Amino acid sequence: MAYTLVNAEDRAAQFPHIPTRSDRERLRTGDYAKVVFDNGAELWVHVTLNIAGALCGRLVNEPMVDLNYGATIHFRPEHVVDIEHVRNRRRDWRFMR
């Protein structure tokens, strides 16, 4: 399962509304983070771990050939383009696109 994530900070013009760096660093277990893959897919990940900015989570979309729903994704705050904190969650993530 090889994948490459886009550094959203390096592409600020493409992602002008990314959350602040401090908000992205404060992701915690149970939150959701949208990350962008090198093929352009923007996918939601359910955060399971954050140790000093090294994040891990489970993919909650099924859009890619090499990755499936529930695949483990390792990422950092610079890969995050959107956040949904668990306390704000009102969506059914099984149907996210």
Image (cartoon, grey):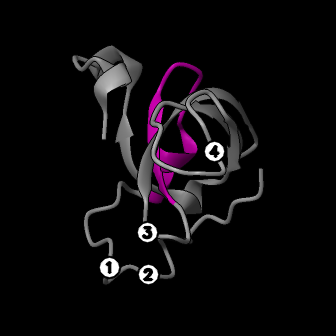
Residue beneath the point at 51% across and 70% down? 39
CA separation in Å, label 4 and label 2: 24 Å
- Amino acid type at circle 2 is Arg
3D distance between C-alphas at marks 3 and 1: 11 Å
> Could you tell which of marks 4 and 2 lies nearer the N-terminus?
2
Q: Which mark is residue 40?
A: 3
Q: Nearer the viewer, mark 1 or mark 4?
A: 4
Mark carried by residue 14? 1
Q: In this picture, which residue range is highlighted in magenta?
A: 21-36
User: Where is residue 95 drawn, in percent x and y?
Assistant: 30, 26
Determine which of the numbered discs, if any, sits on residue 67 in the image: 4
Real-space CA distance between mark 1 and mark 4, rounded to the nearest whole angstrom: 24 Å
Q: Is residue 23 visible?
A: no
State whether residue 39 is above or below residue 57.
below
Q: Is residue 34 magenta?
A: yes
- Image coords of residue 53 (percent x, y): 70, 47
Q: Is residue 69 magenta?
A: no
> Of callouts 3 and 4, which one flags the residue occurring earlier in the amino acid sequence?
3
- Kindly identify which residue carries mark 2: 11
Work out how far the residue at label 3 is from the one at label 2, CA to CA, in angstroms.
12 Å
Q: Nearer the viewer, mark 3 or mark 4?
A: 4
Label annotation for residue 5: none
